Every structure is written in C-alpha cells, then in structure tokens.
Image (tube, rainbow, N blue to C red):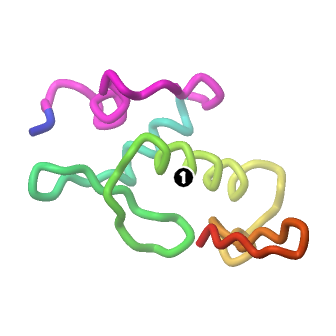
Amino acid sequence: MPQNNLSKIRQIFSASDVKHGLSLFTDREIRFMEGLIRERDGKFHIKCQIKDKYKVTKPEEIVRQLWVYRLLNESFGLFNFQVSKKEDIYLNKEIRNHG
C-alpha cells in the first residue's frame, strides 16, 4: 500500500526495476500529473488526458501523460482531439498495431 508521506509520482518511480526518470519535465508539469493521479484499492490510477478515463498508473504511463500535457499546453497549439496516443505503424507494407 502506498505511503502517504511521499508524493504519488515518487512512490511509483521508486521501484527498483524502474530505469528511467523524469528529468526532461518541469516541476510544474510533474505537479499537474500529481493532480491526475487517484488512489483506489491500494493502487494508483491516472486520468488519461485524451480518453478522459482512469488507467492503472505505471511509470511509462506517467511519461506518456507528461508528453501529452506538454503537447497540449506548450506552444504547439494542439487540442486533445488532435493527439492520438497509439496508432498503427506501417513498416515495409506490414502493419504493426500499437493501439
């Protein structure tokens, strides 16, 4: 069960098998992510900014949501309906589904 004295994101990224970090993101962006995370049944869930639904929070999902936040809130001028998280990739006429 998560510890209440640590931030939600620090708890999620504290696992020994997590090899990446949050050094590319600002404190403001990370604080915004904290607001999207909720605890249910002893697990953290993050609200997807594109689908407007909660998902189990893993480090890679936090990083995805941080990039989505940056795309939507920086000078890129994108709206959430213009951002798709996963699309099919066409590679040598072969489709690889990543959705």
Q: Which residue in the protein does label 1 denote? A: 65
Residue plotted at (75% across, 48% down): 74
The count of marks equals 1
Query: Start and end of the magenta stretch?
Result: 3-26
Is 41 or 38 nearer to us in this picture?
Answer: 41
Q: Quadrant of the N terminus?
A: top left
Question: Is 51 left, or right, of 76 in this rendering?
Answer: left
Q: Quadrant of residue 63?
A: top right
52 up-or-down from 67: above or below: below
Residue 27 position, x and y percent, is 53, 28
What is the magenta segment's predominant secondary structure?
loop
- Quarter holding the C terminus is bottom right
Residue at figure coordinates x 38%, y 46% from the top left: 58
Q: Quadrant of residue 82?
A: bottom right
Is 24 in front, or is 19? 19
In the image, 43 versus 31, the foreground residue is 43
